[in-house]
Image (tube, rainbow, N blue to C red):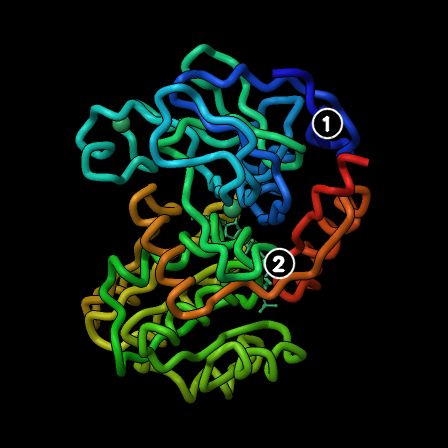
């Protein structure tokens, strides 16, 4: 396939700027997608700036991709030209290990191939969705309903599955009390999904100006985590806490909010280590756990759940040349609630 336009960063301390990249030819199992929209995840910032220490450059971020199929390989059976398609964080895995066989490709024992900042089986660096086209194996491509506004569907491919998967794994259900910590891209999806599963949702946030939104998104209660008196009113309350915070913060201040046998699951991935006081877990048999995105089968299940319940992300659309400014606003918690790039702005 010819060269396509993209936006990339050449180094951890550089801004994103235009770059033309090569996409592979459409192989027999491949789908070529003309990208329409791509969400901006906080993980894009962590990786563009090498905060996790594993970055490869040039980096074209973006793993919340929605577009239309423009070509299919000869062996492709599940997609046709013109259909909508989605791509999340995973574009390949070994397909034979026990995790791949269980549909948990994110835990592939031989290492899954990420949509960007990863090496494919031929050793080529993968490039993400801040670009006009992508070529992906059919098995790692998702079906997207025509029913929903696809601008708001793009963020489901990471923020949606990353919050849906732990809610399902820990069996969050009707009547349970759930707290979502951090009302950003992941957090606002966590609120919508947990509410749709029947949970009573509390948002725990550092931003008082998000209180009205928290209720509109489906939460019943809003607590400012900086107000210790408010925090004291919710000790021993939650069956489940989903922690989406992107920066270092105190887990010890949140664990007392769990009831006996409750679990706090980390999806937020601050680069720095955190301290945890063992007694905060020991005394009431509490669990502190983590969760990584979700497998392809579950991602499709989440997209279908969202189509059925009319759930999309609340988005602020941006032009590709606003991406550096968008990163700065995300770092100030100033996004309601996901930036989505209109990829038409990259084609011009
Ligand atoms: P985001 O939109 O920036 O949301 C993060 C939210 O955390 C902010 O809106 C803010 O909410 C809160 N926050 C920020 N700094 C804080 C601080 N110092 N103390 C307390 N709260 C703070 O980011 P996102 O895209 O949702 O991603 C969140 C995290 O999840 C990132 O670390 C990202 O890399 C990670 N992630 C993990 C996975 C996975 O598979 N586990 C997948 C995707 C993303 P309030 O204003 O409400 O306080
Ligand atoms: Zn992400
Ligand atoms: Zn595998």
Q: In this rendering, does residue 308 appear at all? A: yes
Position of 240 compared to 185: left or right? left
Residue 258, position in %: x, y?
31, 74
The residue indicated by pointer 1 is 5
Q: Element at badge 2?
A: strand
Position of 138 compared to 327: left or right? left
Quadrant of picture, ligand 3: top left
Q: Residue furthest top?
A: 122
Residue at left offset 52%, top offset 67%: 188
Q: CA distance from mark 1 to mark 2?
A: 23 Å
Residue 62, position in %: x, y?
59, 39
Q: Is ligand 2 closer than 8 angstroms to the Cβ of mark 1? A: no
Residue at left offset 32%, top offset 42%: 295
Residue at left offset 36%, top offset 76%: 257
Q: Is ligand 1 closer than 8 angstroms to the Cβ of mark 2? A: yes
User: Which of disc 2 and disc 1 is earlier in sequence?
Assistant: 1
Q: Are marks 1 and 2 in contact (CB under 8 Å)?
A: no
Q: Which sits in the foreground, 27 or 228?
A: 27
Q: Quadrant of residue 98?
A: top left
User: In the image, is residue 13 above or below residue 157?
Assistant: above
Q: Which sits in the foreground, 271 or 167?
A: 167
Q: Quadrant of the N terminus?
A: top right
Q: Element at badge 1?
A: strand
User: In the image, is residue 197 above or below residue 22?
Assistant: below
- What is the tally of numbered marks visible in this picture? 2
The residue indicated by pointer 2 is 338
CA neighbours of label 2 inside 10 A, class few (<14), some (14 to 19), many (20+): many
Q: Quadrant of the C terminus?
A: top right
């Amino acid at each position: 396939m010819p060269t396509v336009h993209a936006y990339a960063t050449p180094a951890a301390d550089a801004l994103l700027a235009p770059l033309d990249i090569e996409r592979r030819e459409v192989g027999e199992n491949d789908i070529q997608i003309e990208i329409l929209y791509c969400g901006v995840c906080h993980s894009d910032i962590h990786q563009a700036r090498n905060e996790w220490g594993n970055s490869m450059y040039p980096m074209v971020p973006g793993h919340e991709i929605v577009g239309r199929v423009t070509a299919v390989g000869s062996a492709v059976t599940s997609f046709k030209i013109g259909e909508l398609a989605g791509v999340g964080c995973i574009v390949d895995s070994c397909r034979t290990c026990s995790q791949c066989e269980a549909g948990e490709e994110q835990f592939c024992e031989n290492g899954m191939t990420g949509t960007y900042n990863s090496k494919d089986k031929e050793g080529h660096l993968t490039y993400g969705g801040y670009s006009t086209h992508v070529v992906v194996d059919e098995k790692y491509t998702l079906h997207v309903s025509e029913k929903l506004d696809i601008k708001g569907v793009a963020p489901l491919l990471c923020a949606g599955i990353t919050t849906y998967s732990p809610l399902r794994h820990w069996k969050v259900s009707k009547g349970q009390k759930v707290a979502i910590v951090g009302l950003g891209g992941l957090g606002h999806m966590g609120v919508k999904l947990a509410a749709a599963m029947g949970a009573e949702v509390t948002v725990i946030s550092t931003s008082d100006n998000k209180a009205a939104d928290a209720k509109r998104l489906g939460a019943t209660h809003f607590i400012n985590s900086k107000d210790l008196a408010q925090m004291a009113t919710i000790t021993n309350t939650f069956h489940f806490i989903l922690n989406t915070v992107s920066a270092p913060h105190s887990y010890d201040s949140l664990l007392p909010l769990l009831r006996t046998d409750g679990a706090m699951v980390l999806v937020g991935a601050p680069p720095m280590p955190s301290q945890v006081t063992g007694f905060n877990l020991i005394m009431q048999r509490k669990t502190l756990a983590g969760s990584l995105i979700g497998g392809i089968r579950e991602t499709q299940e989440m997209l279908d759940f969202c189509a059925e319940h009319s759930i999309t992300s609340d988005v602020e659309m941006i032009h590709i040349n606003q991406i550096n400014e968008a990163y700065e606003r995300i770092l100030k918690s100033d996004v309601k609630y996901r930036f989505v790039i209109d990829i038409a702005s990259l084609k011009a």
